[in-house]
Image: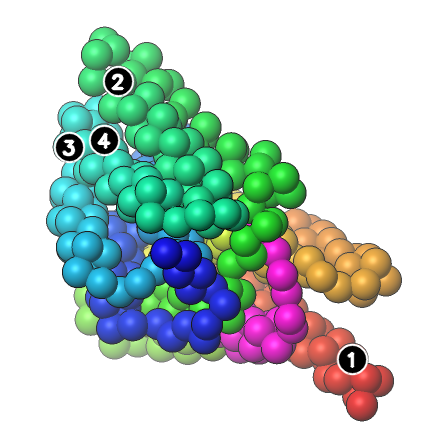
Amino acid sequence: MTPISHIAHKKVTWLELFYDLIYVAAISITAHVLVHSHHGAIQAGTVIKYFLIFVPLWWAWTGFTVYVNRFGKDDTVQRVAYFLQMAFVIVMAASINEDFDAYYLAFMLGYVGIRLSTALMYIRTWLENDGEPRRIARYLGLTFLGGALVSFSSVLIPGDAKFFVLYLGIFADILLPLLARKKVLSHLPVHHPHLLERYGLATIILLGELILVIVNGLREGHVGVEYMIAAVLGFATTVSIWWHYFESSEHIAEEDRKSSGQSIIYGHLLTFLSLGLIANVLHYDFHQELTVRNFGWLALSGFTLYVISTAVIFLPGKSRLHIRQTLIRTAVFIAVAAIALPLLPSTTAIYAALFLLFAGFALAEGIVRNRGKRSVA
């Protein structure tokens, strides 16, 4: 048997949507780690914890998402794997805490459980297929099995060294598919429209989390002009991100790309991280717990990560001239943000400037896309 499912038209299933919702709940809890500020600043250790917790969640979700994109059959075994992974995600989500060390064991076991089940699905596909599907499933199955076992071995390591072993397994998992992009994975391209749809659905659910921050901010505060301004600017910023992301996504979904999808996969790590940072920008504008300078740096970090991520996701396959022009526009927006956001005199001014940056970025990219369509026509 050789079920090469990426050739057929693929649609996102209700089970995939259910799966995404479970993960986004965990990602939302992870972003909440940054809510803990001290003396008007988010401590460096807290930011590091945010990244260290976020990366395994993103990679666990990505691993099975890409498997289903290439080899999914929606049979009983795959459905059982979905539900098993959801249970492990719940374990991970329940273990997310600023005191990461105290909850380490449960978090690690949840992550390893997800990765082992993904590796076993690849091994199943390896044993059932021939040719390129067999070769690719074998490579990824053994790679992910090895990474999961390295991470699991961290239970044997005392002290902080266990974190090094855990992330050694994770980063080996992440790096090896990148190294095999041309020699192995390019021989069985991903189904780009389906992959974009999956990442797009996760993105829109995360944007919904921004709206939830706004709603909670209004509920927890007193009715007043400052809260209404915060809500309006937060909503306008969210709409600007939606407009840019999904206009760009629909534009490249029309392209006939044949690749391993690495730009989409790895670029969305930065997208998801940026949305977590922006959710905290919204939170801190309502609660005013950061100094103006620290609030500016948080806003700058969220904006910079977002625009870099979209360059990674949406640029591959374009002409060299288009890539150069897009990178120049992106650099200009980052430079303006780097000059303005840390220097503005109030959180409201920073918040308004952040909206203008996102709206301006969406508008500039939209104008360029429309010109490109007219020139082709």
Q: Which residues are magenta?
A: 241-264
- Residue type marked 3: Ala
Which residue position is annotated with label 3? 106
Name the residue nearer the viewer: 355 or 302. 302
Which residue position is annotated with label 1? 372
The disc, 4 or 1, on the residue closer to the chain's N-terminal end is 4
Residue 251 screen position, x and y as percent: 62, 76
Neighbours of disc 1 within 10 Å: few (<14), some (14-19), many (20+): few
Residue 41 screen position, x and y as percent: 40, 39
Neighbours of disc 3 within 10 Å: few (<14), some (14-19), many (20+): some
Please indicate whether residue 248 sits to the left or right of residue 16 in the image: right
Which residue: 78% across, 80% down?
A: 372
Q: Are marks 1 and 3 in contact (CB under 8 Å)?
A: no
- Residue type marked 4: Met
Name the residue nearer the viewer: 342 or 252. 252
Q: Residue 173, relative to residue 292: is it above or below?
A: above
The disc, 1 or 2, on the residue closer to the chain's N-terminal end is 2
Q: Are marks 3 and 4 in contact (CB under 8 Å)?
A: yes
Which residue: 25% across, 73% down?
A: 14
Q: Residue 168, relative to residue 283: is it above or below?
A: above
Which residue: 34% across, 60% down?
A: 72
Residue 170 screen position, x and y as percent: 39, 31
Spatial CA span between label 3 and label 4: 5 Å
Spatial CA span between label 4 and label 1: 47 Å
The disc, 4 or 2, on the residue closer to the chain's N-terminal end is 4
Q: Are marks 4 and 1 in contact (CB under 8 Å)?
A: no
Spatial CA span between label 1 and label 2: 52 Å
